[in-house]
Image (tube, coloured by chain):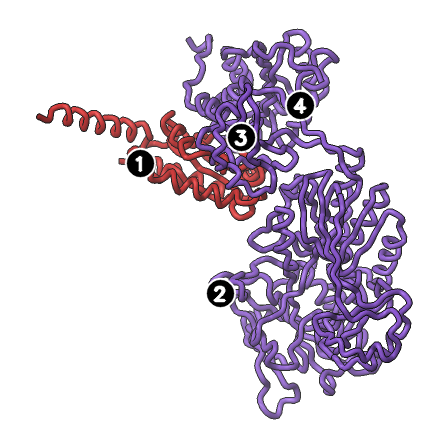
Amino acid sequence: MATASEDMKILILATLSGGYAGADAVGQLHASYAPNTYILPVVCPAMFPEDFYLRVFERGIDAVLVMYSGTDCPYKGGAERTAQLINKVYPLMTERGIDTRRLRLVAICTVCTSAFMREVAQMNQTLAEIGPVRNELAAAVAAQASLSSDEVGQP
Amino acid sequence: MPEPRSNGDVRIGVYVCYCGGNISDVVDCEQVAAALRTLPNVVVARTDMSMCSDAGQALIETDILEHGINRVVVGACAPSLHERTFRNTIARAGLDAGLNPYLYHHVGLREQVSWVHQGNPQKATEKAIRLMMAGIAKARMLEPLEPTVLDAEQHALVIGGGVAGLRAAWDIARRGIRVTLIEKSPFLGGHMAQLETTFPAGEDARAALGDLIDQVVAHPLVTVHTRAELTGVSGYVGNFQAQITQQSRGVSQGFTHFAEAAEVCPVEVPDEFDYGMTTRKAIYRAYPGAYPDLPAIDWAHCDACGKCLSVNGTGLDLENKPATFDLNVGAFVVATGFRPYEPRRGEYGYDEHPEVITLPQMIRLLALAGDGPDLLWNGRTVKNVALIHCVGSREIPGVHEPQPDGQVNDYCSRVCCTATLHLATELRERYPHLNIFDIHEDIRTYGRGHEDIYTEAAANRVGFLRFHGDERPDVLPAPDGDSSPLLVRVKDYLTWGEELDVPADLVVLATGILPSPVDDIISLLKISAGTDRFLLEVHPKLQPVETAVPGVVLAGTAQGPMNIQEASAAASAAAAKVAVLLGQGSVKLEPFVARVNHALCDGSGECVAVCAYEDAITLQTVSDNGQTAQKAVVTPANCVGCGVCVSACPNHAIDVQGWTLAQYDAMLDALAAPLPVLESAT
């Protein structure tokens, strides 16, 4: 069932040379997007190990948009490394019962205002569909507890 | 610089800017400040109409002096605008109390809050509080950082001897910094030497270029090496070791029999200066007046038959003996230029019909044509010329055939529209009886004075036809009996989509601009290229000629399509950057580089394996408490602070200073936390 997404939080990790400047460009247009978005500047998201994203979700932040510079990344190997890391996060999310649609890697340039707005809107649409991450985390805990009690009950 | 007064006792000053109403019209800044005042370590939380004003900055300085503030968080406009302003503010706050400027965090509340959530002030205010809470969480963990200061060799290496490289060399030398300019080909000048006139003023291109070359080569601080390439690089900004490899010229001073030697040389090859429309010998000069004033031997084609020696061998050596030498330089200017797009066989009939040529070829054809009343091509008088725009530019993925390397050139090459119309006007002036058809998708005469060229062409009876990008014209053989050998079939949207057949004795393809193939330089300097293959700057507006590698700047068309005026401006900007960097004899680098915690490092070398920057991080034997072990060691001058090593370390032993994972975790905690409860709300 659809849920209102406005009370759910979207973390946007935005590169200084791409997404962060792109977000500033959206502001300069005085365009409007949902306020449940929290933008943190990053030099290059290749610095974040896989467990960083898990910690984000464990804190109850419902979605992460990694707005990197894509092939325009000024750092050698930064874009490729970021993509590799994000790809490694997805199976870890699945293991923990976290919907992988909560994490998206998107290339946003300094003037990619439409793309920025679209990604935020789409993620909110996804959140409205799948609900808060705490539900998934709670379900995973409950499933684990059930599994443990089954094991204890075995002769 | 004095250390903060009490590192252990974190005392944070928080400032929320009204930005003259830009923020406060939407965000309740007073509520934000009130909420933040309740947080641990926050000593003061204030608002001001304009924090960047003298009065606003004085507020911070006073709090540092009177309240012992040792961390500062400002919520205001974008950090790109005023982060540096406030860093300077806290650094100068009184002689004794001045803080380390990196004990500062800036939160963007205007572009990323008030300007995008105007319809929801309550949510905007809550968001502002959370973002400021995250900033405060990071500020609690900030440490004093010191820039890396390195001695700088006051010597720049300019790669490329076209107009951008020459301009950059001249501007750097005029600021008192030594310059070595290397050019891969035997002659200076680049593509500008192949032009007769330049737009918009119609200046003599080679005369202007010649003046620039004369100035550069006469300057006592400039050394020029032709036939020279960069083949090795080590070191870091201020202190690079550049290895240069130079091919022999084959001809030295004292050789005076060029005409006779060329006469007897049996080797004849297409002359690249005229885009293959003429031939030259294996001993050649690019053009009369070329610098250096010496011919060169074309080693790829000379078979060392020795006939030139038989004329007069003084000053000739028919053995190529490449020489390698090293230079110690403080910075690089990459001015490697462009190459014109060459259409593939069959594209608009190119290489199938001899009457189809490119715009650069046409420019050379006019240069060679002489003063006759008729334009001749392959012995025929040309009566109808069709000029087709956007060849190799503005291609549409999925519609147009990719290049052999899989690339679809979807960008606009920018200079070809004006160059084509400039050509049309020249054709009209020289051959008044010609029929000239300009067949375009769009016309982008964007520069100052360029629109006049369009207007002039239109007034000069140039016929304009317009096609759509996905319905490009066809160049076809004309039916038997037609007076022109070709026709251009175009669906013309200036006549509401009518299909027209334009007769053509000559079809000129306005070919686009491709970057020079410089994979070797990209690899040596560790710089990046975009998907369009042009070299990438850090930021198109904020750092428009700087690469992510400190000490490497870009000049001219290596970075994207530009006309001569723009390439010269970019080169001057690059020169200014080099002058600022090297002018003091030392360079100061931002401290946002990797740092290794040796207590956690087990010397696995994972960080070294993923780092793309030479010697930025290496494994070294380190002594600690009487024990030696292999540990990762960062060379700050080589590190760009990308953080790739951070995620690779299995022991979380590496961080980027100023952007640590712990700081991000603290910010996440703050974003996830409930909003502070205000007294007024209880």
Quarter of the image for residue B268 reads: bottom right
Picture disc at residue B631: 3
Mark 4 lies on a secondary structure that is: helix
Query: Which residue shows up at 66% across the image and 52% down it?
Result: B559
Instruction: Give a yes or no on whether discs 3 and 1 share a subunit.
Output: no
In whole angstroms, how far apart are the C-alphas of marks 2 and 4?
51 Å
Instruction: Say which label, 3 or 4, has the lower sequence index.
Output: 4
Cβ atoms at labels 2 and 4 below 8 Å apart: no
Quarter of the image for residue A96 reads: top left
Query: Which residue shows up at 46% across the image and 21% down it?
Result: B670
Please identify which colour was used for chain A in the image: red
Q: Numbered disc 3: what chain? A: B
Residue under numbered circle 4:
B86
The vertical placement of B281 against B579, above or below, is below
User: What kind of residue is marked 1?
Assistant: Ile
User: What kind of residue is marked 2?
Assistant: Val
Instruction: Say which label, 2 or 3, has the lower sequence index.
Output: 2
Instruction: Give a yes or no on whether discs 3 and 4 share a subunit.
Output: yes
| Label 1 crowd (10 A; few <14 / some 14-19 / many >=20) | some
Picture disc at residue A130: 1
User: What kind of residue is marked 4?
Assistant: Phe
Looking at this view, is A135 or B679 the one in front? A135
Q: Position of residue B189 (x, y in %)?
A: 79, 61
